[in-house]
């Protein structure tokens, strides 16, 4: 997600930003965005127990444990501290899959790969917002796509249908294409359909307009 800039390729650096106590990788999102706009590479690390870490801070018993994510990240870098830009044609999918029950079982969670996040989720959002999201996004349970609403198995209407529902279509959505949104609306018709000329994330790209539509729907 290099932003280009006037920095020559030879002078580009890879900055590894490490937070202080009580913080996390999230605190660097504005600086990281500025560095990327200048043509540099940036990695923001969550130390053990920080906001984006899976570790409970009450279980971290030594500084070595606390610092381990940084040490492991630095050890994985090539000798020159850089990694070449990924060739997206090498990727067969846009998700990284996690197999919590072992690779001989179906995946248990998945997350959109970082190199695709802005292109698919936040193309109309600010660089700062997409940078913050790239730091905070976590895998979602693989069972999520199996969710069904509207009717229970015996055909009796679910009480959830009594809820006043409004569907806000995102016209430039690259996650849920227009035909997918139309299918969702047709399958479970809401009381009203509204449209935003935004990407998948209007809470970033057009929060004022989103608020306006929400208030209008009341």
Image: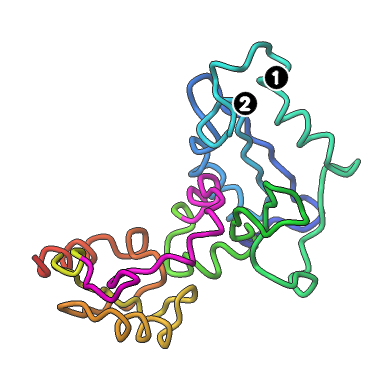
Q: Is residue 52 above or below residue 109?
A: above
Q: Which residue is mark 2?
A: 48
Q: Which residue is mark 1?
A: 65
**Outermost residue, front side:** 154
* Residue nearest the observer in this picture, 42 or 105: 105
Residue, x 67% and y 52% (percent of image)? Answer: 98
Which region shows up in magenta?
A: 130-158
Mark 1, residues whose alpha carbon is within 10 Å: few (<14), some, or many (≥20)? Answer: some
> Would you identify the image quadrant in which residue 124 lies?
bottom left
Looking at the figure, which quarter contains the N terminus?
bottom right
Residue 151 part of the magenta-drawn span: yes
- Circle nearer the N terminus (1, 2): 2
Residue 60's x, y, as percent?
A: 62, 17
Residue, x 23% and y 67% (percent of image)? Answer: 158
Residue 115's x, y, as percent?
A: 65, 61
Q: CA distance from mark 1 to mark 2?
A: 7 Å
Residue, x 62% and y 30% (percent of image)? Answer: 18
Mark 1–mark 2 contact, CB under 8 Å? yes
**Outermost residue, right side:** 79
In the image, 177: left or right of 116? left
Residue 55 part of the magenta-drawn span: no
* Residue nearest the observer in this picture, 74 or 186: 186
């Amino acid at each position: 997600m290099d932003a280009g800039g006037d920095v020559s390729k030879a002078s580009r650096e890879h900055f590894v930003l490490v937070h202080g106590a009580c913080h996390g990788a999230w605190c660097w999102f504005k600086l990281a965005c500025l560095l990327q706009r200048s043509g540099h590479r940036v990695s923001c690390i969550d130390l053990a127990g920080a906001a984006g870490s899976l570790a409970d801070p009450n279980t971290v018993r030594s500084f070595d444990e606390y610092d381990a994510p940084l040490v492991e990240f630095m050890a994985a870098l090539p000798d020159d501290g850089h990694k070449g830009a990924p060739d997206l044609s090498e990727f067969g999918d846009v998700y990284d899959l996690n197999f919590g029950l072992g690779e001989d079982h179906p995946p248990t969670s998945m997350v959109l790969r970082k190199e695709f996040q802005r292109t698919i989720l936040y193309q109309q959002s600010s660089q700062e917002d997409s940078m913050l999201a790239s730091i905070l996004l976590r895998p979602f349970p693989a069972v999520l796509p199996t969710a069904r609403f509207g009717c229970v198995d015996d055909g009796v209407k679910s009480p959830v249908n009594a809820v006043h529902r409004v569907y806000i279509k995102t016209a430039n959505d690259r996650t849920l294409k227009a035909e997918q949104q139309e299918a969702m609306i047709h399958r479970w018709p809401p009381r009203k359909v509204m449209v935003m000329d935004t990407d998948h994330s209007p809470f970033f790209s057009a929060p004022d307009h989103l608020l306006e539509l929400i208030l209008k729907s009341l």
